[in-house]
Image (spheres, rainbow, N blue to C red):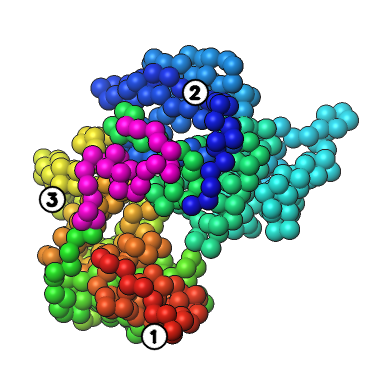
Amino acid sequence: MEASSASNHSNNTILELSGIDKTFGGTHALADVSFDLRAGEIHALVGENGAGKSTLIKIITGAYFPDIGVIKIGDDSYSSLRPEQARNIGVSVVYQEFNILPELSVAENIFMGDQPRGRLQLIDMGTRNKKANELLKRLGAENTINPNDLVKNLTVGEQQLVEISKALATESHIIIMDEPSAVLPSRELERLFSVIRKLRSEGHGIIYISHRLNEVFELADRVTVLKDGQLMATKDVVDTNHAELVHLMVGRELTDMYPPADNQPEDTLLEVKDLDIDGTVFGVNLEVRTGEVLGLAGLGGSGRTTVCRALVGLADVQAGEITYLGKPAPKNAGAASQAGLVLVPEDRKTHGLVLNQSMRFNLSLPNLLQFVRNGVLRAGIEKEAIENMVEDIQVKPPNPEMLAESLSGGNQQKVVVGKWLLTNPKLVIFDEPTRGIDVGAKAEIYQRIRDLTYSGVGVIMASSELPELIGMSDRIMVFHEGRIAGELDRSEFSEEAIMHLATATNGNEDQPAKKVEV
């Protein structure tokens, strides 16, 4: 872990929250929570989905007013803040879902709402571009991002740097980063980490929210743990460890994160031969059997997601065969789901849920034929099925009428999984099944996946999380640039072996890859 620089600023507190309480209806979202941030510090904020992290951040940014408590920024104290007021006194947020306009230029986005102006109050584009380039230079991006570039043409990592530049343009000294690594391919993570360290060295205070605890230990100086709206602990990172943080977050040990794979794969459910897809996937061959988890590995853009979508009729197949239950696979997603072939997509908010509808609506949507007779919805049968599923997948709060957008990320993912479980599937494809959810919810998803295999369901799991693939898969197919670079069985699993195939490099034959214990 990189040496902390926080000690240089240990007495320079720039943000302090004391005794913060916030209640929504009957839910106590925060109870007597205190938190502080120092200049030149990365302070990680962790906890399960629903622990209160988002509520605390919204209070800092003025989106929510606390019921009780004091917010102190610099020498000034506040009972609450308004969003504009928070921005004016130096608070900015870089959200996981970017707040940028893709059809506008980099410079236009950076100075949105505060464009540099010259004579007659006309926008001074020359000054704007010069200032934008100065900000990009601070982030080491002046040679890769041009202020005139349209944001829609940038990579995800470059778009994130534009978001960070927006924070710097407002001279923010408190920068909140909400799951900043969740949207990035692995190859762009180190650039993000370098930028964050540079911001720390310049004296910015950074609140870093992440479910990836390895990032906490790599980046942070201190870490605060919330659970059920309560402050569990604030610790120097050098004085804690992964196991302690997990125990503080979930209130139990997760020694058996990955359920044992003691099932025996049997009949072939799905077989793919010589599959070509839209000029991005070439000559793919694979099969998945009843009762097994077939892992799909590969870097971003390697073809994993494209194959997953094609298997349920969501991508155009140019050549090859997909056979399901001994017959040609369904050609569209509706027919696929009716046949028991379903996809839990990587982007639950865009492709998995209708966010402005209830949990009940989302769970029912692909299952309406079960609840309809003679064109009439049998409300009693639907109600019983939905309530049983909500209880089964342990959504919190267990209110079927709650809007999907109001649920935490982990509970949203449970609803996406639950709606497909109601279809009684034979083969479930999970694409990034635990992206952006906490360790407790991850363990529940893993158990659900393994339970499916125990009942004879086949599972395909595409993931960029190598420990997850190693812990859950019976076999792993590794993709590289649209082709399968190799197949590994459990005796061959290691992060090194997967990455050698994913990057088309050869390992050191004198030093065999270290096996990961699972």
Judged left or right of residue 67, residue 337 is left
Q: Amino acid at mark 3?
A: Arg
Foreground residue, 331 or 247? 247
Q: Amino acid at mark 1?
A: Asp
Which quarter of the figure is the C terminus placed in?
bottom left
**Neighbours of disc 1 within 10 Å: few (<14), some (14-19), many (20+):** some
In the rendered image, the vertical position of residue 37 relative to residue 444, given as above or below: above
Numbered circle sitting on residue 16:
2
Magenta stretch, residue numbers: 232-257
**Label 2 vs label 3, nearer the camera:** 2
Residue shown at the point (63%, 42%) measured from the top left: 201
Residue under label 1, please give it. 274
Q: CA distance from mark 2 to mark 3?
A: 59 Å
Residue shown at the point (52%, 39%) measured from the top left: 42
Q: Is residue 493 visible?
A: yes
The answer to which of marks 1 and 2 sits earlier in the sequence is: 2
Q: Is residue 351 visible?
A: no
